[in-house]
Image: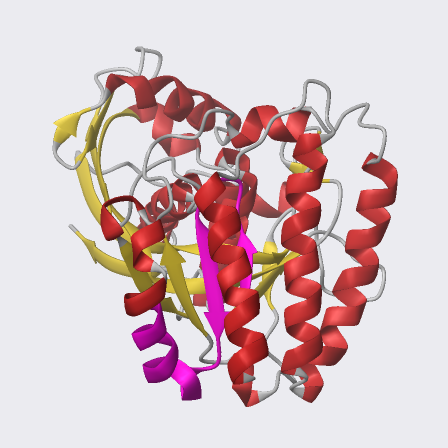
Amino acid sequence: MTEEFKFQLTQNLPQEFSIKASAPSNIALVKYWGKEDIQIPKNTSLSFTLSNCKTTTLLKLELKNKASDETQIQVFLDEEKTPSFIPKIQKFFHLIDPYCPYLKHYHASIHTSNTFPHSSGIASSASGMGALALCLVQIEKQLQPNLSLDDLRKKASFLARLGSGSAARSIDGGLVLWGKHQKIKESSDLFAIPFNDGVHPVFTDFQDTVLLIDRGQKQVSSSLGHSLMNGHPFAEARFAQAQDNITELQTYLASGNVKEFMRLVESEALTLHAMMMCSRPYFILMASQTLEVIHKIWNFRDETKIPVCFTLDAGANVHLLYPRKYKAEVQNWIDKNLKQHCQDKAYIHDEVGKGGEFLEIS
């Protein structure tokens, strides 16, 4: 148990709460793949927080007759009852009980919606758990008004991590780092930290167009993929590589070296999928259209000298990254040359965003 985030009930609880918050997805530049204990990463990761790909969650709590009564949980996705989500929420509530002891006094109804397809490799669990965690810390603010905004966001990252590791990076905006790194003093395995100080302006409004190659649910979940790093023949080398890449990427982010940034980010994406392809059992989440798009990106970059690069999450979809100054030209090229590779010609234009938001409480 982490003493820093324990919460002591000091007053009678209200009969009900209604809390709303939103949290964005994030796209890792240096990937997190492999964990131990309860969502403790095997390596440090660094991500861009997005803006338009987000989850909005309304959490309704109704006081139970007795705290010992079983908590009833209902989950609605896009206003449709979704009982398949309940076991994950039950597990999450159990894990955070020492840190949110008020929850066992309530029945819960969770209404959530995404601006992007669920379970298709755009980190819906990250934005979903991030939004839920932001709801929970708003309750604590009501019970203990002296809590600062920094305290709330730090605890939200800690709680979100227990639901989904990468959700730790969906609370703050801009560049966000999660995982202990020996050269970054404030870094922690328990929560993510903003990583925007000293970053060149070119990276503060980077664009990310998400090319929806496959809008369906992934064939292999991220949880299973992480577990396959246990005993993976190249795991330790990969974890060491990621730590070195964090250090290297820091220099490019500070200097504004977009060319080297692109090289490292693409290498990280391909390494992530290489780990999948040589795990036991092995699996492939890229699709044929993923490869077609990657080759077109490389050709476009070579021909135009416009700095565009790709990264991949744990799925077939391609995130196309580029500086804001090239937005019009790149998006015109996407519309003419890449959308035909997307399922239903669908893509999402996004950009680096400000992080999660507290929306309302009553």
Tell whether position 314 is magenta.
yes
Q: Is residue 289 above or below residue 62?
A: below
Colour option used: secondary structure
Residue 350, given in percent of the width and then of the height, sits at 35, 66
Residue 273, given in percent of the width and then of the height, sits at 64, 41
- Seen from the viewer's position, the closer of residues 314 and 169 is 314
Residue 183 visible somewhere in the drawing = yes
- Seen from the viewer's position, the closer of residues 29 and 131 is 29
Residue name at image x 61 percent, y 71 percent = 195
Tell whether position 345 is magenta.
no
Residue 184 visible somewhere in the drawing = no
Q: How many marks?
A: 0
Residue 236, given in percent of the width and then of the height, sits at 86, 38
Residue name at image x 54 percent, y 88 percent = 201
Residue name at image x 54 percent, y 69 percent = 299
Q: Would you say 228 lies left or right of 290 here?
A: right
| Highlighted range, magenta | 307-334
* Residue projecting furthest to the top: 69
Residue 351, given in percent of the width and then of the height, sits at 39, 70
Q: Quadrant of the N terminus?
A: top right
- Seen from the viewer's position, the closer of residues 134 and 322 is 322
- Seen from the viewer's position, the closer of residues 57 and 49 is 49
Q: Is residue 227 above or below residue 144?
A: above
